Image (spheres, rainbow, N blue to C red):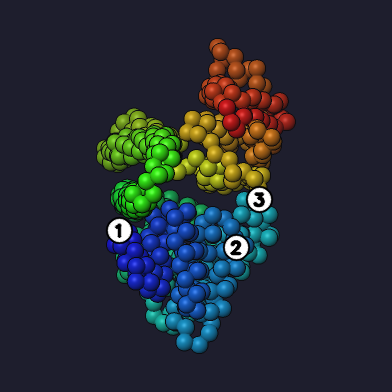
Amino acid sequence: MEYAYKGFKASEEVNDKKEMAQSLHLMGYLFYEFRNYENALKNFEAASVIYKEMSDDLGFARNNNMIGEILLEQNKCSEALQKFNASLAIYNKPNAPAWGKPWGYSNLGSVYEKQGDSIMAALSNTAAITKYKEALKTFLISLHQFEQIKDPAGIAEQNIFIGKIFFKLGQVDNAKKYLQNAVSMANVVGEKKNLATCYLYLSKIDSTQGNISNAYKHYKLYTAFKDSIYNLQSSQNLSLYKTQLDIEKKDHEIALLATENKLQTTLAEKQSQRRNFAYVLAGLLLAAGTYGFFRFKKQSKIKGEQKLLKERLAISQDLHDNIGSTLSSIAVYSQVAKIHSEKYEQQNMSELLEKIGTTSNEMITEMNDIVWAINPGNDSMEKIVLRMESFAKPLAAARNIYFDLQCDANLSSIYLNMEKRKNFYLIFKEAVNNAIKYSGATGISTSINKNANYLLLTVNDNGVGFNIDVEMTDHKLSLSGNGLKNMYKRAEELNGNLQITSNPNSGTSISLKIPING
């Protein structure tokens, strides 16, 4: 990342458009690999502008595909489909690289599969199967084309995609065949992520067919590869974060130096003018004094803000480095101890270590929430909404619960400070978590709206509901009751109003109203 950034700066100095675009594309790809989609998208979009200026269709198509993949990760299927179709049209032209078309068809298949998953989560099986069949058709085209050009990585990946689709269509024998082919090819190219996916779905197939022994064996292999990938990504993400801070620091220092040079030049010119026009000396001194006073006040304010930002970044990084690494170690050690305890049939020890591992992972999640809340880059409402969606959607999908979040278009102009942002997000998280865990709901609908100087959050579910008075009684307080008390406490800290409406068998409605300023 550091060298890609240096390459971009060097090519920018000599106005080498081609190298600028390639450096931006490389930085976008690295951010994408680290799942930093916001920065990845910024770099890819900047590269697209340059590729268009140069009329470099192939560079534009490759870059456009990566934008499509980010949009797909963000569940923006329609926008992703437009990007993929535009790239595929370019790759269908003469003299395009051989890998362009199969890549394009594979991307289309991924969109159809994602659409099928969303429809299936909404319990519309027939419509979902139609999408899965469209995905299967395009994946098979992609596999055939990758086989023609003898691309082992492409062949392995398409075998996985086809195996997953057959599994979702209930054709487990076909799914198993393609996944076993994928294992062989993935071992050749050494792709851990693909191997992890293969073993996960082979475990599901074995479980479906009643072969519990093989299911357990494949799941252990999946866990081993997944843990290996997680540890590598954690290390890479930390390195990227530090590099990012260094790059931002260098840019800031360069900007400050340029401003200072400009100021010195201006002062020198004014001194020359004062020598030539001595009769206005008194007026110039008065003006300079006034300018210096306001400049001093402005610089003091800027320094105070910079100091606050640096302190928040330092806290964020220290939490990530120290607490995160410690808790991750606890989780890893408990998994190792569990394996040893199972070997010697120490049941009680296994259960205890399982609890330790679960608790550690929950603490890691909570720590990540704190790190996110402290980071000054997350002050905007847009970042808060993305965080809310990334928490709720996967959790709801895992329980086959339909989740929907609607927001006002003018929310992007709202910025909440660290304390407000943290409490607002944690109230939403507690409400959604309670609905998923305890309500038995099939659907959760949420909305965020702006009304005058107030922010309104609602979370509604169609679950079994509960008796609020019973849950909030001190001598009979449950886990969900504790959560409700925390929500009311956080609402008070926000100077807001929290209302919870629920009755047995009639669902639950939670409404939060907080002032945006004050």
Say which amino acid is labelled 1.
Answer: Glu
Give above or below for 247 relative to 145.
above
Q: Nearer the viewer, mark 3 or mark 2?
A: 2
Give above or below for 176 relative to 377.
below
Q: Could you tell me which residue is drawn at 47 percent across and 87 percent down?
A: 95
Q: Give the quadrant of residue 133.
A: bottom right
Where does residue 300 sit, x and y in percent of width and height? 39, 34
Q: Residue furthest right?
A: 506
Q: Which residue is mark 1?
A: 2
Give above or below for 107 relative to 331.
below
- Which label sits on residue 474? none
Where does residue 52 sit, x and y in percent of width and height? 51, 74
Specify whether 2 is left or right of 173. Answer: left
Can residue 434 be seen?
no
Specify whether 133 is left or right of 148. Answer: right
Q: Secondary structure at mark 1?
A: helix
- Estimate the spatial distance between the alpha carbons at disc 2 and disc 1, rounded to whole Å: 31 Å
Near mark 2 (Cα within 10 A), the count class, few <14, some 14-19 or many ≥20, is some
- Estimate the spatial distance between the alpha carbons at disc 3 and disc 2, rounded to whole Å: 21 Å
Closer to us: 300 or 197: 300
Q: Nearer the viewer, mark 2 or mark 1?
A: 1
Q: Could you tell me which residue is drawn at 55 percent across and 32 percent down?
A: 424
Q: Could you tell me which residue is drawn at 66 percent across and 50 percent down?
A: 122
Q: Residue furthest top?
A: 475
Q: Which residue is mark 2?
A: 79
Q: Nearer the viewer, mark 3 or mark 1?
A: 1
Closer to us: 421 or 328: 421
Say which amino acid is labelled 3.
Answer: Ala
Q: Which residue is mark 3?
A: 122
Q: Secondary structure at mark 3?
A: loop
Can residue 40 be seen?
yes
